Image (cartoon, rainbow, N blue to C red):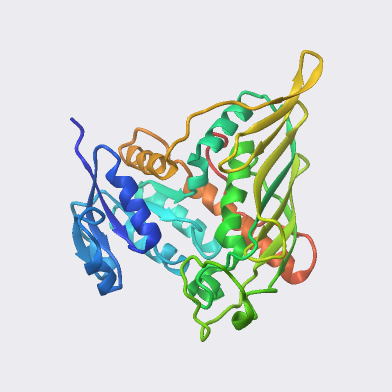
Amino acid sequence: MARRVRIGIIGMGKIGEVHARALRNVPGAEIAAVCDADAKRLSALGEDIAPGRRYLDCRELVRQPDLDAVVVATPNFTHSRYTLDALAAGKHVFCEKPMALNAREAFRMVEAARKARRRLQIGMVCRFRSESVVAREYVRKGCLGRVYHMQALWRRKRGIPGLGGWFTTRAKSGGGVMIDIGVHLLDLVMWLSGLWNPTRVAAATYSKFGCRMRDYVFTRMWAGPPNYKGVFDVEDYAAGLIRFGADATLRFEFSWAANCREEMFVELLGDRGGLRLEFGQPVTIVTEYGGRVATVTPEYPETQHFDLQAENFVNAVRGRADPGATGEEGAIVMSVIDAIYRSATVGREVPVRTSGRAKSTPR
């Protein structure tokens, strides 16, 4: 019988609790230690969420010799530092998205994992949704043919998280809607299509709602309540076009807040078929069948994507699977986000600067 994989979790906020509950559902995984800088939050955790040892200092957690791996579920500005500490201590690492504040930090993390010969997995949980898995299967079977254009759109009417907190402070978050939810769909379209060669970006970003903090009208707020004495120096809307050499293009649009209909979808257009993916809705494929245009809507079971992601990480630690989202892929996504912000600043198309490419595309 295989030895249990002993895992420590750094950061026990909402997403840390989500990862803890998912790991509890993975056979052979054990939460052996948890860490959070907030002593009250740490003491309030129930044994069902955090049964292991408890630490206020993450450096103390990563030094524990009996830990095999660490989950980093902290604010963005700590991702790189905590990941590097864990890798230096010989631990495999699961790091929440976004991987880092920028591509420079991300590639440093990739290199550290390579030198340590440890697994580095990024929390791109949208890959594990049942809709995404089914869509990926159809693309890999060649049902779309050659993909030449893609769309990624995620628009919230009023969805700014933690107004005035670290989410809306660039020095701590790295950016706004682009790095918060845009990162998910950028990764998803590249993973679905297998196109990991972004070359140029033309983009624009806007700050129209969050900057007027006391006038911001909302009905709910993730990571709230608002801190009106805090900072909002990030974008709440981003749009643009990404080129993948001469192969394909991607149009994107993301909003935390806008006067619009709420909408979220990914679309891939190929010369043999087109595919549309919306979370919580059936995947649809437009193609030709029997000499006629046809729409195919496959049936598939619903799955628990956080549980599947946790299981994949445990298997990756054991050497039985590749990480569901590699550090190399995460760094390429960060390179695109860097280019988006750079293009928005200079007001023209700019190259995507990458110091590496994903090693396994597609998997």
Q: Position of residue 176 (x, y in %)?
A: 59, 67
Residue that protrudes farthest toward the bottom in the picture: 229
Q: Is residue 311 left or right of residue 165?
A: left
Q: Is residue 45 left or right of residue 122?
A: left
Q: Residue at x 56, y 26 (%)?
A: 299
The residue closer to the viewer here, 201 or 239, is 239
Res 144 quadrant in image: top right
Q: Is residue 316 visible?
A: yes
Q: Position of residue 245 (x, y in %)?
A: 75, 44
Q: Residue at x 52, y 45 (%)?
A: 126
Position of residue 361 relative to residue 289, above or below, is below
Res 262 quadrant in image: bottom right
Q: Position of residue 314 (x, y in %)?
A: 32, 41
Q: Locate the N terminus and report the quarter of the image it occupies.
A: top left
The residue closer to the viewer here, 342 or 286, is 286
Position of residue 16 relative to residue 212, above or below, is above
Q: Is residue 338 left or right of residue 250?
A: left
Q: Position of residue 125 (x, y in %)?
A: 48, 47
Position of residue 204 relative to residue 190, above or below, is below
The residue closer to the viewer here, 284 or 120, is 284
Position of residue 99 relative to residue 295, above or below, is below
Residue that protrudes farthest toward the top in the picture: 290
Q: Is residue 355 visible?
A: no
Label count reads 0
